[in-house]
Amino acid sequence: MKIFACLFLMLSINSNLYAQTQKLPLDDLLLQDSIYKSNKKKVLNFSLKEFDTLFLEFFNRKQDPNILFTKTEFYTYTVQIATFSDRLASLYPDQKELAAQNKQQWLSESYEDYLEYKGSQKK
């Protein structure tokens, strides 16, 4: 239970907090949907260790000023992290609402915002 709370605390710190769900461009939503469909089964079978590896890889690569994700790479990470929230919700039924909120936060991550962030890293 502590692992679950800690993971979502880290996810929340890293995510942008919005009063409303951010609207993504249609092409981004279609890309997310495609990634979700092709990765759902694999991600729902991740262990917590595999998820930790995925999350840390994303976080470390995102922070590296020498790495710039393509749109597909960026959304592959964020959609996989969001999809794992479904697994956590099934493992911890009392945390379904928190899992759903975190899933929505990760699905609302914008590639454009990421590019702005990367631009600010170089200054």
Image: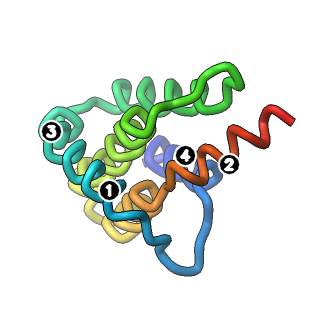
Q: Single out the mark in the foreground, 3 or 1.
A: 1
Residue type at tag 2:
Glu
Residue 57 as seen in the image, left or right of residue 41:
right
Q: Who comes first in sequence, dot 3 or dot 2?
A: 3
Q: Which residue is mark 4?
A: 6
Q: Position of residue 48 (x, y in %)?
A: 35, 32
Residue type at tag 4:
Cys
- What is the number of the mark on residue 75? none
Element assignment for label 2: helix
Q: Who comes first in sequence, dot 3 or dot 4?
A: 4
Q: Single out the mark in the foreground, 3 or 2.
A: 2
Q: Residue at x 44, y 71 (%)?
A: 23
Relative vertical location of residue 99 with respect to residue 39 in this rendering, above or below: below
- What is the number of the mark on residue 27? 1
Mark 4 Cα shell of 10 Å, populated few (<14), some (14-19), many (≥20): few
Q: Position of residue 64 (x, y in %)?
A: 67, 24
Mark 1 Cα shell of 10 Å, populated few (<14), some (14-19), many (≥20): few
Nearest the viewer among 6 and 75 is: 75
Residue type at tag 1:
Asp
- What is the number of the mark on residue 116? 2
Q: Who comes first in sequence, dot 1 or dot 4?
A: 4
> Distance of mark 2 from mark 4, alpha carbons?
28 Å
Q: Position of residue 101 (x, y in %)?
A: 42, 67
Q: Which residue is mark 3?
A: 38
